[in-house]
Image: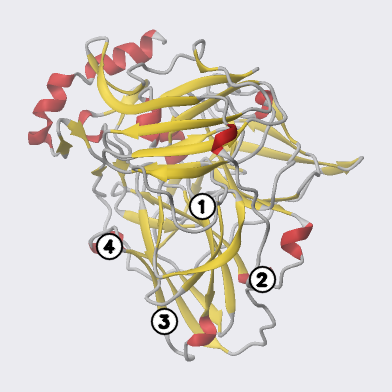
């Protein structure tokens, strides 16, 4: 642990947290909850701006079956709120960054060029990636430097995303704009008659707050990790952005659309609903075995899901809201679809999508326990795993390559837990098996006082990885554990 982290966490002492009721911090049994950061700028009118679809990145070259991309991180300005200019940090100077599209098994090399004034780290969230390219939080790319990340992509088609992963400062750097979508495709998926082309939409959803001049607000500490005491539980913005636009509207045909939903918020969970049926076809780790019809869909920070919505069920002139049932007021809205035309539609959702191997927990070589909780450390308050703060030099587990393991995760308050390297399957939630066939995930939400058992198999790569809370304020305040595949 660096002195700067220790000093910052000491400032956020337990005594200050106990007294935080007067400063607006919501508490459960003395543990801080996510807190709304109110904008000084007037909230924009919902559905007044069009949805923007991020540009698809083109490789700078393709040689010997390898595609080479370049992402330059730089400061820029963007019109996120109508009439105001917002300083951002963006991949390619945009927020979100460009969408990368790749094919399963086709090696993709991304050169990250850091033109910012702070170190950064690139992580492909959901990527099955060698350790030197996974974005270990201390593998910093210094200002003015560059680094190549190699992604073999020996994994199923899926909706992934990429974002900054710098130790202690992931929260503020993602908040300022360092995030984008990464789509992996494969022949199995492409053989299905799912909506495609302009009807295959990546939707990166996040919340932000803004000053009167349009600048993003964030309650960080000057040049130190962590946030002000009232926001230790996580920072919630009061403006919902989809692909960088506040509460946008998209004009759609009376046809099926595939919505690739990504929760890129620091701390906000969403309960997404359209008022009608949605057909879920995929989760974090790609296609489900079979589609399932849902009326609402919960996504914790870091989680993704793909749904097909049939706007052919609506009349021209109707408007369909994508709402957040977990929000209140303006935060209960996400975006709107305006049905404005007829078009031919030959897409369909077949009854079988994919084969999903079920990992057998009886073959697990070990069961490990990981407790996620707030607690005292060095005279202050931090977010801990098994009662200890993150230390990049300490390995909390050393699974063997090829082994299956069961990991038991427990929580005090809500923690979205993300596992690097390999996807996993949920075995039980508070002792109850989930309904339906297994699916592959890389992030699972622990609700308040909950125990979730997952099973995973460690494949292909030896080296250091991390398990952590994807509430980014929790992550920055030490809720991360390193493990090494041996």
Q: Tell whether 358 sits left or right of 101.
A: left
Q: Mark 3 or mark 1: which comes first in sequence? A: 1
Residue 416 seen:
no
Residue 56 to residue 474: above or below: below
Q: Which of 175 and 299 is in front in this view?
A: 299
Q: Where is residue 477 in the image (x, y as percent from the top left)?
A: 35, 24
Q: Do the residues labelled 4 and 3 touch (CB within 8 Å)?
A: no
Q: Where is residue 38 in the image (x, y as percent from the top left)?
A: 23, 48
Disc 4 target residue: 330
Tell me the element at label 4: helix
Tell me the element at label 2: loop
Q: Do the residues labelled 2 and 4 touch (CB within 8 Å)?
A: no
Q: Residue 402 sits in which quadrant?
A: top right
Disc 3 target residue: 319
Q: In which quarter of the image is the N terminus?
A: top left
Identified at 49% across, 86% down, the residue is 313
Disc 1 target residue: 304
Distance, label 3 to label 2, CA atoms, is 23 Å
Tell me the element at label 1: strand
Q: Mark 1 or mark 4: which comes first in sequence? A: 1
Distance, label 3 to label 1, CA atoms, is 24 Å
Q: Which mark is residue 194?
A: 2
Q: Tell whether 359 sits left or right of 436.
A: right
Residue 142 to residue 86: above or below: above
Q: Position of residue 422 (x, y in %)?
A: 61, 36
Q: Do the residues labelled 2 and 1 touch (CB within 8 Å)?
A: no
């Amino acid at each position: 642990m660096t002195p700067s982290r220790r000093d910052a966490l000491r400032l956020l002492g337990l005594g200050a947290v106990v007294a935080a009721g007067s400063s607006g911090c919501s508490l459960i049994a003395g543990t801080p909850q996510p807190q709304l950061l109110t904008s000084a700028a007037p909230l924009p009118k919902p559905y007044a701006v069009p949805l923007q679809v991020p540009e698809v990145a083109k490789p700078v070259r393709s040689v010997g079956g390898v595609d080479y991309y370049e992402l330059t991180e730089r400061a820029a300005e963007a019109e996120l709120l109508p009439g105001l200019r917002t300083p951002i940090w963006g991949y390619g100077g945009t927020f979100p960054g460009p969408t990368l599209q790749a094919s399963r098994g086709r090696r993709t090399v991304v050169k990250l060029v850091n033109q910012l004034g702070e170190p950064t780290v690139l992580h492909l969230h959901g990527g099955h990636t060698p350790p030197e390219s996974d974005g270990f939080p201390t593998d910093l790319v210094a200002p003015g430097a560059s680094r190549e990340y190699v992604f073999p992509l020996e994994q199923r088609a899926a909706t992934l995303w990429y974002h900054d992963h710098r130790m202690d400062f992931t929260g503020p750097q993602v908040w300022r704009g360092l995030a984008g979508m990464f789509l992996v495709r494969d022949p199995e998926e492409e053989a299905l008659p799912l909506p495609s082309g302009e009807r295959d939409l990546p939707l990166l959803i996040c919340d932000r707050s803004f000053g009167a001049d349009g600048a993003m607000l964030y309650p960080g500490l000057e040049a130190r990790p962590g946030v002000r005491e009232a926001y230790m539980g996580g920072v919630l913005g009061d403006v919902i952005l989809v692909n960088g636009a506040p509460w946008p509207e998209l004009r759609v045909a009376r046809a099926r659309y595939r919505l690739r939903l990504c929760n890129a918020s620091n701390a906000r969970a969403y309960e997404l609903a359209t008022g009608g049926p949605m057909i879920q076809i995929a989760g974090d780790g790609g296609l489900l075995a079979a589609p399932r019809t849902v009326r609402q869909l919960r996504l914790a920070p870091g989680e993704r899901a793909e749904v097909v919505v049939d706007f052919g069920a609506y009349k021209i002139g109707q408007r369909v809201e994508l709402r957040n049932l977990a929000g209140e007021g303006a935060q209960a809205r996400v975006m709107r679809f305006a049905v404005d035309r007829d078009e031919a539609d030959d897409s369909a959702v077949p009854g079988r999508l994919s084969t999903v191997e079920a990992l057998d927990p009886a073959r697990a070589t070990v069961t490990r326990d990981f407790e996620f909780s707030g607690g005292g450390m060095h005279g202050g308050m931090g977010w801990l795993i098994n009662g200890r703060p993150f230390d990049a030099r300490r390995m909390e587990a050393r699974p063997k390559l090829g082994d299956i393991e069961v990991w038991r995760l427990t929580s005090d308050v809500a923690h979205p837990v993300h596992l690097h390297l390999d996807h996993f399957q949920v075995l039980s939630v508070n002792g109850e098996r989930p309904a339906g066939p297994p699916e592959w995930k890389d992030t699972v939400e622990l609700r308040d006082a909950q125990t979730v058992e997952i099973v995973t198999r460690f494949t292909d790569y030896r080296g250091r990885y991390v398990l952590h809370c994807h509430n980014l304020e929790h992550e920055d305040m030490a809720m991360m554990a390193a493990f090494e595949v041996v």
